[in-house]
Image (cartoon, helix red, strand yellow):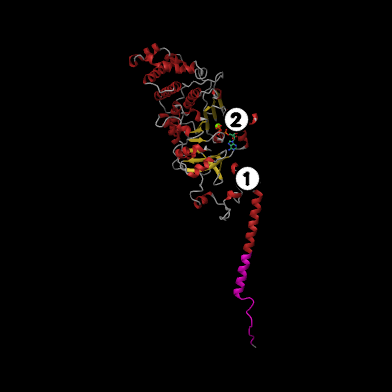
Amino acid sequence: MRIRATAAPLFTPRTVKRAQAQARRKALAEAQRHARKVAEDARSAQRPAPEDQDDLAGSGALFPPGGRPGVASARGGKLKLPAHRVTTAVAAGAYPFLAEGGLGAQGLLIGQDVHAEAAFCFDPFELYGRLAGFTNPNLLLAGVIGMGKSALAKSIALRATCFGYRVYVPCDPKGEWSSVTLQLGGSVIALGPGLPGRLNPLDAPPRPAGVSVAAWAGEVRKRRLLLLSSLTRTVLGRPLTPMEHTALDVALDAAVNWAAGQHTVPLLPHVARILNHPDVLTKISGEVAGRLGDAVFDVAHALRRLVSGDLAGMFDAPSTTAFDPRVPVLSIDLSRLNGTGDDTALVLAMTCASAWMEAALSDPSGGRRFVVYDEAWRVMRHQGLLERMQAQWKLSRGLGIANLLVIHRLSDLLSAGDAGSRSRALAEGLLSDCSTRIIYRQEHDQLAATGALLGLTGVEMRAVADLPRGRGLWKIADRSFIAHHQLHPAELAMFDTDARLTETA
Ligand SMILES: Nc1ncnc2c1ncn2[C@@H]1O[C@H](COP(=O)(O)OP(=O)(O)OP(=O)(O)O)[C@@H](O)[C@H]1O
Ligand SMILES: [Mg+2]
C-alpha cells in the first residue's frame, strides 16, 4: 500500500539547518550580553566617584580596561566604537601619527607615557647612537613655577645613581638639593658669607692619562684665563679690551710662577695683587705690552670684589674640599647668596664653582655623569657663564656628560641678549645642542614663542598650555611624548618644596 504524504515533513535538512543557525545566533547573543555585563561590572568597580574624576585625569593613574570614563572617552554621540586594548606596537600601526611606539625599556623609569599608557623610560646615554637624530645627551627642561621641574631633575638624579651614574649640581641657589645629595650619600659644599667652605677656582685638575705634561699645562692655563676673563667681564658688565686681556694673561703667568717658587697653589689674591701694582705689571710685561699697568684699573677693581669685596672669603683661599670623583652626587649650595637682589654675586660664585667642578669633570674616564643647572634662568643673561656652558655642552659627548638646563620659559633664552648679539647666539646654541627638550606647562602668552622655537605642532602647543603638575611634553630628537613623571612616596617626601608654604599656611 502506498501512503501519500499530505503535509511537508517536520524535519527536512533545510529546517534543521535553519534551526541550528537560529540556536547559534541566540547563543552568540547570549554570550555577548553576558560579556557586556561582565565588562560593565568591571568598569563600575574601577570607575572613580564623580568627584575623583578630575583627579584621575591629572594624576597619571592608569585608566580602567574599558577606557577613560565619561565624556573624555569620546565614545558618546555618534561614535559607538567598543573600547579595546592593543600593544603599543600595534597601536602605532593602527593609528599612525597618533600613538607612539615608545622608546623601549632601557634606562631610567620616568613614569607613564600618557597616550600609550605604557611605562616611559629614558636614558640619554642609551639613546645616543640608537635613535636617529639624537645627536647629544643634553636636556632642556622648561616650565612655569611649581610644575615639578626640580622634582623631575632630582628623580633623574636619584634613579641615575642606581645605574652608577654620578650627578653634579654646580649651582643650587635655593639649597634644595642639599638634603637629597646627603640622603644619596653625596657631598654638599655650602658657600656664602660666614661659611667655612672655600673653593679655589684656579685649582689644576689631575692630568688625565695619555696627555703629555706640556699639553696639560697649556690646557690648564687656557682654563684659568677663561675663568679670569669671565669673572672680570661679569663684574664690569662689558667685554674686555685687548689690553685688559693681555694684563690678565701676564698677571696669571706671574702669579703661577710665584706660587710655584713658594711651593704653593696659585690663588685669585695672587693675581689681584699683581694687577693692583701697575708698575710691577709693566715691568713684567716689558716692551711687548708697553705701559700695560695703566690700562688695567678696571680689571684690578673687578677682581677685588672676590678678594676683599662682598664675595671675599669664598674663592680666595686653597680649597677646603678636594673633589672626590667617587661620590655619587655633589652639589654646591649657594643659598646664602640668594635674596641679595643682585644676581651678580650668584653668577660670580657659580662661575668659580663651575670652573672648579668642570676641571674635575674633564676626565673622560669618569663614567657617565649628569650636570644639573637648576634655576638656570637666573643666570642666562651673563655672557661669561653662557660661554662656559657652551664649552661644556660641546664637550658633553666626548666626556660622557649629560647637561640638564632648567628654565622657566623658552624666552629666558631669548632674553640672554638682543637679536644678533653674541649672548643670544650662545643661548640659542645651547638650545640647539639639547636633543631632549622637556616642556612643562607654559603660560598662554608664551605658547607662540615656545612653538616657534621648538617647532611644535598646534596639538602639541594646546597640550602644553594645559599640562598638570608633573606632566610634560618630551621632544626627543624628532619624537614626541606626553609623559607623566611618577614619584615614589619616599621621593615625594624627599623632594617636597611645598612644605614650607604649607607649614606657614
Ligand atoms: N610628578 C609629581 N607628582 C606629584 N607631586 C609632584 C610631582 N612633581 C612635583 N611635585 C610636587 O610639586 C611641588 C613643586 O615641585 P618643584 O619644586 O619640583 O617645582 P618647580 O617646577 O621646580 O618649581 P620652581 O619653578 O619654583 O623651582 C613639590 O612639593 C613636589 O613634591
Ligand atoms: Mg625648581
What residue span does the magenta drawing correspond to?
A: 2-26
Q: Position of residue 58 (x, y in %)?
A: 59, 42
Residue at x-position 60% and y-position 68% = 21
Which mark is first along the chain, 1 or 2?
A: 1
Cβ atoms at labels 2 and 1 below 8 Å apart? no
Q: In the displayed structure, would residue 261 be above or below residue 95?
A: above
- The outermost residue toward the bottom is 1
Q: Amino acid at mark 1?
A: Gln
**Residue 303 visible in image:** yes
Q: Is residue 426 above or below residue 49?
A: above
Q: State the image quarter where residue 331 is shown.
A: top right
**Within the magenta stretch, is there residue 431?**
no
- Marking on residue 363: none
In this view, the residue farthest toward the top is 279
Q: Residues within 10 Å of mark 2 (few under 14, many from 20)?
A: few
Quadrant of the image containing the N terminus:
bottom right
Within 10 Å of disc 1 (Cα), the crowding (few <14, some 14-19, many 20+) is some
Q: Position of residue 55 (x, y in %)?
A: 62, 42
* Residue 21 belongs to magenta span: yes
Residue 416: where, in percent of width, then height?
45, 30
The residue that label 1 is drawn on is: 53
Q: Closer to the camera, 363 or 340?
A: 340
Q: Disc 2 residue type?
A: Gln
Q: Secondary structure at mark 2?
A: helix
- Distance between the Cα atoms at labels 2 and 1? 36 Å
Label 1 secondary element: helix
Query: What is the number of the mark on residue 183?
Result: 2
Residue depth check, mark 2 versus mark 1: number of the one nearer the observer: 1
